[in-house]
Image (spheres, rainbow, N blue to C red):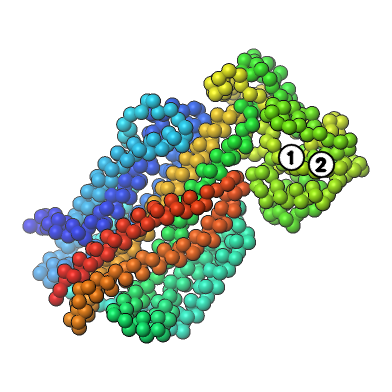
Amino acid sequence: MYSKLPFKNVRRSFKDYTLYFLTLTFGVCIFYIFNSIEAQKAMMSVSRSTADIMKTLTWLIGAISIFVSFILGFLIVYANNFLIRRRKKEIGIYLTLGMEKRRVAKILLVETFLIGMISLGAGLVSGLFLSQGLSVVTAKLFEADMTAYRFIFSVNAFIKTIMYFGIIYLIVMVFCTVSISKFKLIDLINAEKKNEMQKLKSIPVTIVLFIISIIFIGCAYGLVLKNGIASFNTTLIFEMILGALGTFLFFASLSGFFLRVIQTNKKIYLKGLNAFILRQINSRINTAYISISLICLMLFCTIGILSTGLGMNNALNQGFKFNTPYDVSLEVNGDGNIIEALKKYKFDIYKYTDKVVQISIYQYKKENLTKSIILKPIEKDIPKSVSRFFMGTPLYLIKLSDYNSLMNLQEKKEVSLEDKQVAVFSDYADAVPSLGKTIRSYININPAIVISGTHYKVYDKLITNRMETSAGGGVFLALIVPDSLANGSIVNQSIACFNCKGDRKVMQDKFESDMYALSDKYKNTDKFKMGMATKESVRSISAGAKAMITFICVYLGLIFLITSAALLALQQMTEASDNRYRYNIIRKVGADDRMIRSALFKQIAIYFLLPLCVACIHSIVGIKVANDAIISVGGVNVIGNIIITAILIVAVYGAYFLATYFSSRSLILNSRM
């Protein structure tokens, strides 16, 4: 008889388990999908650079999955507590009839195991099929050839999913056993009539805490708007702690403050069942403000991650165009003829191109020229981190003839300098508009630079064209000078750039492959040290960065969103289960089903909207600051990203809200006593 009871309970209580089951299934599905990315490489034709990036992406997803497993584990433990609480009276009846706690625990463990196995199986099957669609997205992001497409099953993702969720369910079973061992029969029988302990009762205290919370949140907003998030430092950590603490205090104080404000308007407070609704909300927030605060912060993370993270794609696209003025760039530290150096290894660069431009970047020999010459007059207008890092570093020189040779290769206009004239160069200036604006202001107010006692007039325009093809880096600040001024100076770096002949993409791939072979041949020696970047390799890196950002943002965003919505749903279903007794009382004093449905809808709607509204207010500031940082690498389609995020939140969050309302309504209206 006992062996059949768990199966009958699961079948009988399927409505109670539906939301729990679907949440677990969705969590397992997402977990498998994103951990199957590595297996998708088998059906795509990718370059060596792309393969390396996919390995990095797989490692990142694996690391993030550990964090995700903790979130899902917390959700499952919380949901399991809800199911136990939902059935306290039933458990009390079992104990009254003489069943041992050990036997009750065993029944609940079997039920938990059944639900876990069903959701794990359904999630893996769903993930297996949906991951095939992700393969198409992955190939598009990496711009890979999918002619070898086939159905992919990731053994690694399958094993990892089973292992992680197996551990989570073992922990759940331990929690379940411990919870049942602490139950008292009298508490189980009277569970529906027992009120939760109120955390804060004093109205003056809640009002003071409310004011403090607003001050904390306002200070956090002001500091982050002033300092930005360009660098992760103690200031940013303090701002985050201040904002989080303000959010916790806000929800801790909201119940008493909110109720007192509404009570002052008798028309609203005494209308219909509003007094009952407000008391219910007040009671729930008062006892669960910690979980509501966490949900609010998770929703804030969801909105921020999705709306700003996805915006990086457009920025990276713009960055790629700027960073690849040539098909190939090679560089060595110090003085060196790159073409002659390759000839020593019997590597003929002219198999791939008809024209190569070689230039040098110099460090002035006669005196110690530093960037402070330019940065000092504009120090107050640039970030302290930039000033501190670059102020004392060398100010490099670029010969005018070298620069113009590169512009000829790019088919761009040359620069003409007068006698004793120099031009300020920075290929960071367009990537970081605020920096470009500041340097241009320097050019306008400083007509001359003194070098070795000689005054050199500053060219009236800031030069910003890219010097070489590269995935990053570049020349932060330098001077383009007459050739005679750089003669005899120390060569800091040598660069060679060219465009391929024939089929340029094919030739780039061949050149990259041949260079890798040469590098591998001499990798155990110090003879061959040469940096290389092709337009296609930078494209792969850019595509990889887009894929990483997209996958990680969607992965974390969905997990946070589902967890937030599921926690709110479970809390309200717990509330509905506990409040059947109270709803039956107001029914007995004259409230009809229509009034009860309306009251329940308002109660759940307010409870769902409250953390979302606060999260949206936080996000206005967060998105503004994040986009200011993203602008440093290109433009961002803010409106488009916010619309996509809003649609996703409305779809998922709205679905959980409706499911919670209908489940709670059924529970309340079908429990007449």
- Does 135 sit above or below residue 616? above
Where residue 325 sits: x, y (%)? 64, 31
Dot 1 crowding, Cα within 10 Å, few <14, some 14–19, many 20+: many
| Mark 2 crowd level (few <14, some 14–19, many ≥20, 10 Å Cα) | many
Disc assigned to residue 459 = 2
Assess whether mark 2 and mark 1 are in contact (beta carbons under 8 angstroms).
yes
Residue drawn at 20 percent across, 73 percent down: 593
Q: In the shown orientation, is residue 24 left or right of residue 250?
A: left
Report the Cα–Cα distance between label 1 and label 2. 9 Å
Look at the numbered disc 2 and give the secondary structure of its residue: loop
Specify the quadrant of the image occupied by residue 193.
bottom left
Nearer to me, 310 or 517: 310
Residue 13 drawn at (x, y percent): 17, 60
Q: Is residue 627 above or below residue 455?
A: below
Mark 1 falls on what kind of element? loop
Q: Is residue 333 visible?
A: no
Q: Quadrant of the C terminus?
A: bottom left
Give the residue drawn at x 45%, y 53%: 643
Res. 134 image quadrant? top left
